[in-house]
Each structure stands twice: as C-alpha cells, then as structure tokens.
Amino acid sequence: MMKFRSFRYYLKEAITNLFRNGVMSTVSVLTVASCIFMFVLMFSLAVNIDFMLHQLSNTLGFVVVISDDATTAEKEALYAQIIDAPHVSDLRYIPADEGLRNFMESLGADDGLFEGLGLHGSNPLPHIFEVRVGDPRYMEMVVRNIVAIGGETVDEINEQSELVNGLITFNRGVRIASVAVVAVFVSISVIIIINTIKLTVNNRKTEIGIMKYVGATDWFVRWPFIIEGILIGIIGALAADIIFSYSYTAFINSDFRFFEILGEFAAFRPSSEMLPLVSIVALPTGVAIGAVASLLSVRKYLKV
C-alpha cells in the first residue's frame, strides 16, 4: 500500500513535470478535453433519445379497427389476447358511439352539427381498440402479433410509428458514430500523453539512472509519471465537463422553433438531471485515458 509521504512526493514530482513541459502538457490537456467533450456529447444524445422514447411510450400507440361483423364474443376474445400479448402496456376498447361522442366534443359540437352532417341517428365510426406499447421499439412487433391473432376480426391497424422509428434509427447511428469518434480521439489523446511523458523521461534520464543506482524500485520511478498522466486526464475531463455544462444549459434554454415542435411529442432531459450524469461519466473517462497512456509510456520508454 502506498504511504502518504510517498504519494505526496509522487504528486509533487507529477505537478513539477506538468509545468516543466508546459506546452506539451497543455496540448495533452486540450486533446483529452476534446476527446471527452465529444464522448459526453454523444453520450448525452443517446441518453436524451432514450429519454424521449420513454416519454413517447406513454403517449404513442396505435388503433386497431374492429370489423363491423365481429360479434361481442369475438371482440372479448381479441381483447383478452391483445392485453396478454408481450410489450402491450395498456388497452382500451372504444365503442363507435363513444368514439363519435369524443370526436364531437373535441370539436365543441352539439347535436345540431349531427343533423347538419346527416349523422343524426347514424354513426360512421367503427369500434376500435387503442393500444399502448410499453417500449416503442417493440411497436412493429406488437402490430404484427395483432395482425396474426386478429384474423377477420380486425379490419385494419392505424399505426403512426414514423417518429419512433426515426428516433430509434437516429439513436443507433449516434451510438455507432460515437464509438468511432471516441476511438479516434482516445487514440490521439493517448499518443500525445505518451509523447509528453516521453519528453519528461528523456529530460530526466540521468536523474532516473542515479535513482535506480542507489536502490529506487521500478514503481518508485514510475509513479510520478503515472500520476502525471492521470492529472492530465482529470484536468481535461474537468475542462470538458465545464464546457459541456454551459453549452447544454444554453441549448436547453434557447428559443429554437425546433423545441416548440418537438415539445408536442417529447422533451430533452433537464440540465439538473443531465449534468450530474455527464460529470459522473467524464471524470472516470479522463482518469482512464491518462492512466492507460502513462502506463504505456512508462512501459515503453522507462527502461533505464
């Protein structure tokens, strides 16, 4: 276990190394910050799309139009089969009379309009089931199941899954793109940190040789460089977190017309929930990048 006195020495040496190679350290920090910013940006997109899909699951569904020839027993049997089907979260039977009444109430109409349209005593609307799906990703599967079990009892199914499918496809693309972008930036960050530590090692090669000659262990020599890489990762992560926090808050609070349109269906996760989540992700990522880069650097260049 590392002693506190030893850790204080390692930390002091790591900070000294950062300032000794100020230019390379700054470049390393900026690269790590860029890497982590892109990572948390992609992460926030994926989280927000999942958040929107969850909201849509409570509002979006589809309508199953029941055949006029269906008997009460067939409707009840179909209802029982649908409500027990996988991923169906809610099911409501709406008779034609109730459907027409709801429609007229939504228009603020009265019986006079019925007579004017020639609907008094008649009803052009069918009996329907309103189906809600627990997870929008399974909407198409639920529709296929109802088509299979409905038979002639079902006239048609009116589904409006374009928005859901669009979000799912976009989310899948974001995840794939994020992996590619983060992989590139992580590689660049690791290479630059390795070069930064390599420069420090080369500048202190004689000093390190003397330390090992008088009995310093390999890990005693290595720890300051490892902590240096971790510090670069932490500083870069904090910088990325601060930039993202201001950017996300400004984005959420802006008055884009897009938000007004989107708000009819779903909303972004609020800053109070998103920013702590990003902070939890950013710092370990920075530490991991710095630690891996410094370990690789020490292993490759610290052979004295």
Image: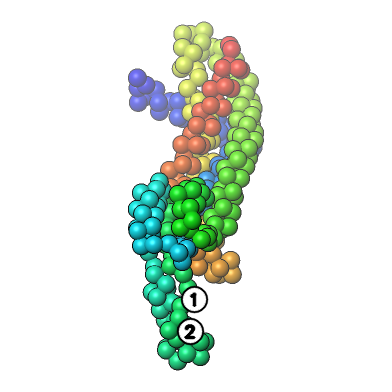
Percent position of residue 266, x then y? 48, 62
Mark toward the start of the polypeptide (2 vs 1): 2
Quadrant where the N terminus sits is top left
Q: Nearer the viewer, residue 3 or 82?
A: 82
Q: Nearer the viewer, residue 90 or 7?
A: 90
Q: Is residue 17 above or below residue 139?
A: above
Q: Is residue 252 above or below residue 121?
A: above
Quadrant where the C terminus sits is top right
Residue at figure coordinates x 56%, y 17% from the top left: 299
Badge 2 amino acid:
Leu
Q: Nearer the viewer, residue 246 or 203?
A: 246
Residue behind mark 2: 119
Residue at figure coordinates x 50%, y 17% from the top left: 221
Badge 1 amino acid:
Pro
Quadrant of residue 258 within the rendered picture:
bottom right
Percent position of residue 45, x then y? 54, 50
Residue at figure coordinates x 56%, y 52% from the top left: 165
Q: Is residue 50 above or below residue 233?
A: below
Residue at figure coordinates x 51%, y 61% from the top left: 155
Residue behind mark 1: 124
The secondary structure type at the circle numbered 1 is loop
Residue 213 visible in this rendered orientation of the protein? yes
Residue 271 visible in this rendered orientation of the protein? no
Percent position of residue 251, x then y? 55, 61
Judge left or right: residue 79 versus residue 33.
Answer: left
Q: Is residue 107 above or below residue 87?
A: below
Q: Say if mark 2 contacts mark 1, CB within 8 Å.
A: yes
Judge left or right: residue 50 versus residue 32.
Answer: left
Q: CA distance from mark 2 to mark 1?
A: 8 Å
